[in-house]
Image: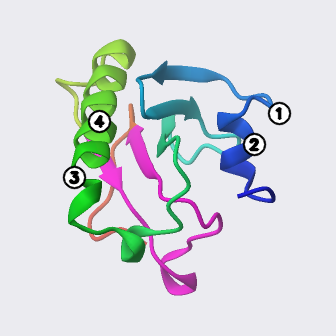
Amino acid sequence: MDGCIFCKIVRKEVPAKWAGESSGAIAFHDVNPQAPVHVLIIPKEHIGSVMELNPGHGPILEEIFALAQTCVKNEKIAFSGFRLVMNYGPDAGQSVHHLHVHLLGRRKLAWPPG
């Protein structure tokens, strides 16, 4: 999708601080971090949101979560804990309409969130 900021990051038209990459997904540091570690993991393919997922997307979801595990290890937050978050819609704070997982860590995260 031409106007999607995350698609532009995938195409390297917009710079990002890389945190990892696999054949179908990339991970990069959020420009507005909400925790000391705030990495976004996205599919290289444009998928607008979690509501656009279908059974055929299973392999890309597996790849996204495998890349999240790699980022957790690289950031050394496996033992202290972390949170993976997917937002959908305006009430949840979704601001970019490209499927993404937030990896948050290296600080105490409150529950319930929000």
Q: CA distance from mark 1 to mark 2?
A: 5 Å
Numbered tag placed on residue 58 in the rendering: 3
Residue receiving disc 2: 8
| Residue 29 to residue 85: above or below | above
Nearer to me, 103 or 26 = 26
Say which element carries label 4.
Answer: helix
Q: Amino acid at mark 3?
A: Gly
Q: Is residue 61 left or right of residue 89?
A: left
Nearer to me, 12 or 87 = 12
Q: CA distance from mark 2 to mark 3?
A: 24 Å
- Mark 4–mark 3 CB contact (< 8 Å): no
For the residue carrying disc 2, how many other residues have a C-alpha within 10 Å: few (<14), some (14-19), or many (20+)?
some
Q: CA distance from mark 2 to mark 4?
A: 20 Å
Residue receiving disc 1: 13
Mark positioned earlier in the residue sequence (3 or 1):
1
Say which element carries label 1.
Answer: loop
